[in-house]
């Protein structure tokens, strides 16, 4: 908890979502009965997991490119996000 105190509330929420995997992606929503399918809305045969959303969904490739261009090798290190 003390590590999260200097962070803005929205960042703390994101950390909790990532740690608990209770994030508003279809994989989780399907498990709790809120989505008819666990699949990504952009990739028909792939589950919309946190890893898929952050690292491999082609729909978000441009956003990942901008992130990597801006942050370089730090792009996927939590303290820099």
Image (cartoon, rainbow, N blue to C red):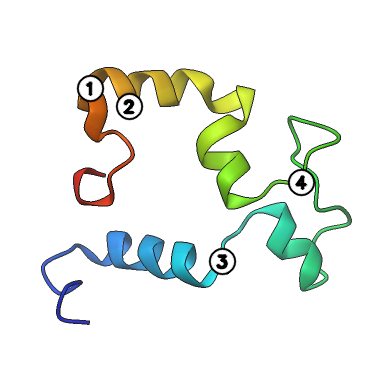
Is 48 drawn above or below residue 66 in the view shown? Answer: below
**SS category of the residue bearing label 3:** loop
Label 4 neighbour load within 10 Å: few <14, some 14-19, many 20+: some
The residue that label 1 is drawn on is 70
Question: Of the numbered discs in the image, which one, if any, rests on residue 21?
Answer: 3
Query: Which residue lies most toward the bottom here?
Result: 1
Q: Quadrant of residue 13?
A: bottom left
How much space separates mark 1 and mark 4, taking CA atoms? 28 Å
Instruction: Name the disc covering residue 47, or none.
Output: 4
Q: Residue at x 22, y 28 (%)?
A: 71
How far apart are the alpha carbons under marks 4 and 2? 23 Å
Residue 43 in picture, x, y percent from top left: 77, 30
Whether residue 22 can be seen here: yes
Q: Percent from the top left, x then y, of residue 48?
A: 70, 46
Question: Which residue is under mark 2?
Answer: 67
Residues at badges 1 and 2 in contact (C-beta under 8 Å)?
A: yes
Q: SS at mark 1?
A: helix
Structural distance between the alpha carbons of marks 3 and 1: 27 Å
Whether residue 67 sits left or right of residue 32 in the image: it is left
Residue shown at the point (39%, 60%) measured from the top left: 14
Q: Position of residue 75 (x, y in %)?
A: 29, 33
């Amino acid at each position: 908890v003390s590590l999260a105190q200097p962070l803005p509330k929205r960042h703390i929420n994101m950390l909790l979502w990532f740690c608990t995997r209770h994030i508003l992606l279809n994989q989780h929503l399907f498990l709790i009965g809120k989505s008819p399918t666990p699949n990504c809305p952009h990739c028909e045969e792939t589950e919309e997991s946190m890893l898929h959303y952050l690292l491999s969904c082609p729909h978000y490739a441009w956003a990942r490119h901008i992130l990597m261009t801006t942050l370089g090798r730090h792009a996927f290190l939590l303290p820099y996000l």
